[in-house]
Image: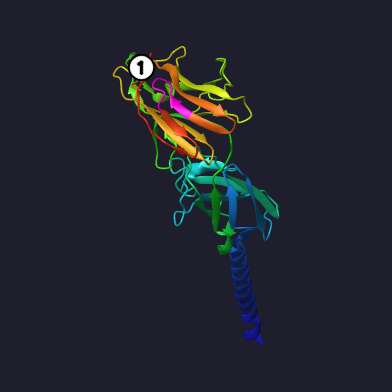
Amino acid sequence: MRNIKNLLPVLLVALAFVACDNDDETLEDVRLVKTVVTLDKTSVTATEGTEITFTLNVDSPNSSAMDYKVEIYDAGTTASFRDFSCSGDETDTAAGGFPQGRIGYIMTVPAYATSTTFTITPDIDLLKEGNEVLKLRLVSSGNGLIKVNPDSEIITINIADYVSNDVGVGLTWDKQTNLFGSIIDTPYIGTDNLAHDTSMFDFDLYIFDPSGAPLNFDGATSANPELTVLDASLPDGDYYVYFEIYTYTGFIRPKVAFNHDMKLTMSKYGVWSTTISVPMTTSDSFADYVAIITKTGNSYVVTDYVTNEVLASGKVANKKPSFTRRK
């Protein structure tokens, strides 16, 4: 009996250790269980410019917000990262590393939410490209609190060209682009012997009506590319495509000039498109008409402003000219 009494405290301590171990294992199991999210759909057909809403369902709400991301999935995609926009915040490898990873759009599931939504919008493209396939991957990101249902990991969007009787006109100048198609600036030494970049170069794009008045100022911003539209509801007649370099106070030209080519793309959306290249250098001060769009109902003929050569007509682009005009 004396031995049993002596062993009793030892047994109680041992049981306490076992209980603690079991509690630790239970806590560990809880920590390893992540919230599983599932999409309401993973395959969609849409037209350029159409906003698509996806619902992300949560199996067990969390007291903290949970991060996730949508990124390009290489296998089977014919569209690029610049062919769509998303309601999330864009990130890239330069700003990322783990946990951001590849370039994509980062979003969050709000705390205690049983579901959340995000949108994907295929961009309206001036080029007539035919149907494209955009494949995206849904992944956990940031705080890593979620697990994506394997059946919801890959999103497939079949994209059809936007078709319209309107004519879109876009102007792009050749700043460099990175791996993801983002326009980046090129550094240069200015006439003041200081370093600058090509964000100092800005071009404005206009379409003038038959009376010589600009249709709008949509193409006169600081964007690259600039975009403006000739609306099909406008009266018939000749419309003039014009662009110019915008020089502002403090504008500094390069000490040594370099090529600065311009690309003007015109398209009757989903029907025909044509691209005009205007070779320039950074020493040029350009301000001139480039093309004439002759409108007859919903039919258009695009001609070179100087030579009257037909560049586009009817259903297809006839020419892809390259010329220089300077003032």
Q: Which residue is mark 1?
A: 284
Give residue 62's position: percent from left, percent from top.
67, 55
Of residues 252 and 84, the one nearer the viewer is 84
Q: How many marks?
A: 1
Q: Element under label 1?
A: loop
Q: Quadrant of residue 181?
A: top left
For residue 150, side relative to residue 78 (left or right):
right
Question: Residue drawn 67% across and 48% down?
Answer: 110
**Residue farthest along the front direction in this orientation:** 296
For residue 137, side relative to residue 280 (left or right):
right
Question: Residue drawn 36% across and 17% down?
Answer: 284
Residue 276 visible in the current orientation: yes
Q: Main secondary structure of the magenta part?
A: loop
Residue density around tag 1, few if under 14, some if 14–19, many if 20 or more, within 10 Å: some
Give residue 211's position: percent from left, percent from top.
57, 15
**Kind of residue at badge 1:** Asp
Of residues 241 and 89, the one nearer the viewer is 241
Please say if 94 is above or below 9: above
Q: Is residue 197 magenta?
A: no
Position of the N terminus, as image quadrant, is bottom right
Give residue 72's position: percent from left, percent from top.
48, 50
